[in-house]
Image (tube, rainbow, N blue to C red):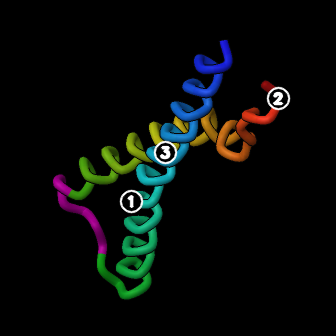
Amino acid sequence: MAKKGKAIVIEKRIECIIGILLLISPFINVYCYLLDYMSGAEWTDESHSSVLIFIGLIALAGAYLFKDGFRYFFQKDSNNSE
């Protein structure tokens, strides 16, 4: 049972890391969008609107993985208890 629990903790830690990686791209794109918006450029092309939807979906997936794995990320291994 201890090996199975340890495997679940490792799996959730990996999910948390993947979630963080998926969240980095939307933050960078929002930052770039705000820089373009403040400089006067507008994202009105059809290709840009589909990119924004895709970035939003990536952010949702990353937030879901991050939410589920965050509590396991800082959990200590119980090697000393056995």
User: Which residue is at a point 38% across and 59% down the rendered structure image?
Assistant: 25
Q: Quadrant of residue 54?
A: top left
Crowding at mark 3 (Cα within 10 Å: few <14, some 14-19, many 20+): many
Amino acid found under the numbered disc labelled 3 = Gly
Q: Position of residue 30 (x, y in %)?
A: 44, 66
Question: Which residue is nearer to you in this view: 10 or 56?
Answer: 10
| In the image: residue 38, left or right of residue 82 | left
Say which residue appears at 28% left-offset and 66% top-offset: 43
Q: Is residue 44 left or right of residue 61?
A: left
**In terms of sequence position, does the residue under pointer 3 or pointer 1 come before the other?**
3
Q: Report helix, strand or loop for mark 3.
A: helix
Kindly report which numbered mark, 3 or 1, lies closer to the viewer in this rendering.
Answer: 3
Q: Position of residue 65 (x, y in %)?
A: 52, 36
Q: Which mark is residue 49?
A: none
**Label drawn at residue 81:** 2
Residue at image location 26% in from the left, 52% down from the top: 51
State whether residue 6 is above or below residue 77.
above
Looking at the image, do the residues carrying marks 1 and 2 touch, with CB atoms under 8 Å apart?
A: no
Q: Earlier in the sequence, mark 1 or mark 2?
A: 1
* Mark number, residue 25: 1
Q: Quadrant of residue 41?
A: bottom left
As drawn, which residue projects farthest toward the bottom?
39
Q: Which residue is mark 3?
A: 19
Cα distance, mark 1 to mark 2?
A: 40 Å
User: Per the image, is 9 magenta?
Assistant: no
Q: Nearer the viewer, mark 3 or mark 2?
A: 2
- Few, some or many C-alpha atoms within 10 Å of disc 1 (few <14, some 14-19, many ≥20)? some
**Label 2 Cα neighbours within 10 Å, binned few <14 / some 14-19 / many ≥20:** few
Magenta stretch in the rendered image:
42-47
